[in-house]
Image (tube, grey):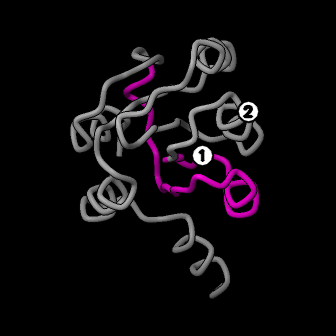
Amino acid sequence: MTLKKVKELLQAEVVCGESQLDEEVTFAGGSDLMSDVLAFGKPGILLLTGLTNRQSVRTAEIIEAKALVYVRGKKPDKEGIELAKKIGIPVLSTHYMMYTSCGFLFKNGLPGVSLLREKEDEK
């Protein structure tokens, strides 16, 4: 699924990274606990969160997230936006709650990171 499709499904605003909307994402995960993101996150994840401080952008960088989606109408502060631009991580903001956002994405074919781990464990 492209980030452009994510933007459409979630009726999201692009905070930064407009030129990267053709990028593909193959799985997603959502959490407000960055320790959980560090535990389950994998490179290429579309990360959904309501945590808007700079730590969320740094965590996305560490796990090599493809993009960040802030839920509940939240947006990162100026420092967070500048950091996202610097490291090249697109940032979107949706008014939907986390549960609804994840549900829309899953319903439209974007699996969660846990499903990928389950498939890997089966091998």
Say which label, 2 or 1, has the lower sequence index. Answer: 1
Identified by mark 2, the residue type is: Arg
Q: Which residue appears at 45% of the width and 38% of the height?
A: 69
Residue 96 locus on image (x, y percent): 29, 46
Disc number placed over residue 44 in the picture, else none: 1
The location of residue 77, given as percent across then percent down, is 57, 19
- Depth check: give the residue in front, 56 or 109: 56
- Seen from this angle, which residue lies furthest bottom? 122
Q: Is residue 77 left or right of residue 70?
A: right
Q: Is residue 60 above or below residue 122?
A: above
The residue type indicated by label 1 comes to Gly
Foreground of the two, 1 or 62? 62
In x, y percent, where is residue 51? 57, 41
Q: Is residue 33 rendered magenta in the image?
A: yes
Count all numbered tags in the image, as a single digit. Answer: 2
Is 46 situated above or below 118?
Answer: above
Q: Residue at x 58, y 12 (%)?
A: 78
Based on the picture, tell me whether residue 17 belongs to the magenta stretch. no
Quadrant where the C terminus sits is bottom right
Q: On the image, which quarter does residue 89 sit in?
A: top right
Residue 66 point in image, percent of width and height: 56, 38
Q: Which mark is residue 60?
A: none
Q: Which residue is mark 2?
A: 58
Mark 2 vs mark 1, foreground winner is 2
Q: Quadrant of residue 20?
A: top left
Range covered by the magenta-colored residues: 20-48
Q: Is residue 88 above or below residue 71?
A: above
Task: Say whether residue 35 is left or right of residue 70.
Answer: right
The structure residue drawn at horizontal position 43% and vertical position 33%, both measured from the top left corner, is 74
Q: Is residue 88 left or right of residue 68?
A: right
Left or right of residue 26: residue 105: left
Q: Secondary structure at mark 2?
A: helix
